[in-house]
Image: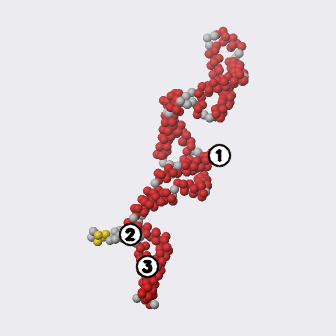
Amino acid sequence: MLFIMISIGIGALIGAFTNALAIKMLFRPFKSWKIGSWQVPFTPGLIPKRRSEIAEQLGHMVENYLFTAEGLKQFIEKSGIRNQLLKKLQLNIQGLVQQNQTVKEMMNPFLPEEWKAKIKGMIQQKALDYLSRDEVRAKSLADFLSEPALIKIEDRLGQLSQMFIQEIKDFLHSFKGKVWLDSIVKQLFEGKRMIGFLAGMLLEGEQIQQKLLSYFDQILEKPDTQQVFQTFLVNEWNQMKEKPIGDWLDDFDPILHTQLEEILDKGLEKAQNLPFQQVIDLLNKYNFLERAYHWFFELFQEKMDKIFSYLSIAEVVKTEVNAFSLEEFEKMILEITNRELKMITYLGGVLGGFIGLFQGVLFLFFK
């Protein structure tokens, strides 16, 4: 019986030791051992020896099965992260709004002056490139404007004719208008002494001005006059809206660059001085932020396959695994699988004990 117990103990020790040694040899030694030119077998350990192959296979596994574009799409749809990010974005914007700053004050920490100049130059060049295209130059204003916009402009022409008439009346009744009328009267009677003498006998200069003003007011207040103005404006607009954009650009070509730069300067300056609150209110009025966010998210999902192909996940994983310290890698694996590896060691001891028991029994019966 003592012999069997010793046999079981020796078998258990050998089984546990060989399993523990096999586990250790997965990582150790990290480098090959050599005696002269002869390399000691099983050095380096399995993982250091096959490190490049493991890194490559791990990269392919992550790219093809774990971190895929389709998997990320499904995660986004099921997890609700899209709405969570939107709420977080809205909260962050609300926090910025409460700081009561202008757009310029908000952007200064993130947008250096040289970047502003680059952005302005980029916008200007993009605008010039766009306007220089043949297909753009061949189009007219009517091609660019929508049908509702054209209808709205034509409706406003009637109001514009009323404004012109009112402006003319206001000018005629102003001090400058009266001076102008006086000069007209003097030019009218100049060189015609008899008519001037008779007019001077019958009417004073101020009375002549009043008569003219009254006459002009009657003409301007007639419905036909407003109709003439409106017809004139409509005819001019019809010609303008059918004129090719290229003709407009040619007319302004000598000053186009300067004018465009001035427009951009004024527009950017005005935009920068706006309160951030006002900008956000305007964007919220048209639900622009939420629509832009969903548009960006949908575009991101559509382009995800292309993005993943550019990222080359397999190559990234391979590079990171090859650069990872073997000591740290061993420590991480052992920490994660410590319990399971211990069980493998114990299992080796149990199996070794059974083998020792079997050998002891065979020795007793067949000695």
Residue under label 3: 15
Q: Residue at 41%, 75% (x, y): give it.
A: 21
Look at label 3 and name its amino acid.
Answer: Gly
Mark 2 against mark 3, which lies toward the viewer?
3
Dot placed on the residue nearer the N-terminal end, 2 or 3: 3
Instruction: Specify the quadrant of the image occupied by residue 365.
Output: bottom left
Q: Residue at x 45, y 83 (%)?
A: 358
The image quarter containing residue 224 is top right
Horizontal relation, residue 148 to residue 122: left or right: right
Q: Is residue 8 visible?
A: no
Residue 63, image x, y percentages: 48, 57
The amino acid pointed to by label 1 is: Lys
CB-based contact (under 8 Å), mark 1 and mark 3: no
Residue 218 x %, y %: 72, 21
Q: Is residue 170 above or below residue 75?
A: above
Q: Earlier in the sequence, mark 1 or mark 2?
A: 2
Q: Amino acid at mark 2?
A: Gly
Q: Residues within 10 Å of mark 3 (few under 14, many from 20)?
A: many
Q: Which mark is residue 45?
A: 2
The residue drawn where x is 31% and y is 69% is 39
Residue 285 is tagged as 1
* Placement of the C terminus among the 4 image quadrants: bottom left
Any part of residue 182 in sight: yes
